[in-house]
Amino acid sequence: EVLTEGYIPQEEHQAKDSAGVAADHKAIRDEPFPPAWVLPGLAAEIETSEAGLDGDRHELLGAVLGEGFDELPPRRHPAYTRANKRIRGVVAGVVLPRLLAAGMLVESGVVRALAEDTTRESLQLIL
């Protein structure tokens, strides 16, 4: 099972013939994922995240900075803020239809997360 923002390739193919069928398949695929499981992603902070190994975390932060992994990454950096907003925006896009259907959109923080994701150029809503 996989939770995605938008369709998986098989659903994209189906959408060419019938958008309704593809949307139904996506809804069925998303059903096992309660919004409560995904909502913590709206508060994602990569700089304080936990990884299996400290080296993995340092490597991730170094990749976000676009720098080598030999040095200890700084605790705070504007690149982390941009990455956090992007991650939160992706999570918001994934969970938005479910929260909308449940009447939980406003209090969830999804709208704020989408607004703060300045890297997003479009939003595909599959309702």
Image (cartoon, rainbow, N blue to C red):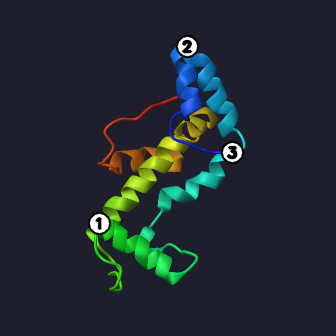
Q: Position of residue 55 (x, y in %)?
A: 48, 81
Q: Is residue 34 above or below residue 26?
A: below
Residue sitting at x 43%, y 44%: 111
- Along the viewing direction, whichever of 91 and 99 lies nearer the viewer: 91
Residue sitting at x 48%, y 61%: 43
Does residue 73 appear to the left or right of 10 in the view shown? left
Observer able to see residue 127: no
Residue sitting at x 49%, y 56%: 42
Q: Quadrant of residue 17?
A: top right
**Residue placed under numbered mark 1 in the picture:** 79
**Residue placed under numbered mark 2 in the picture:** 17
Q: Quadrant of residue 11?
A: top right
Of badges 3 and 1, the one in the foreground is 3
Observer able to see residue 19: yes
Question: Mark 3 or mark 1, which has the lower sequence index?
Answer: 3
Q: Quadrant of the N terminus?
A: top right
Residue sitting at x 53%, y 49%: 108
**Mark 3 to mark 1 CA distance (whole Å):** 31 Å
Q: Position of residue 95 (x, y in %)?
A: 55, 43
Q: Position of residue 103 (x, y in %)?
A: 59, 36
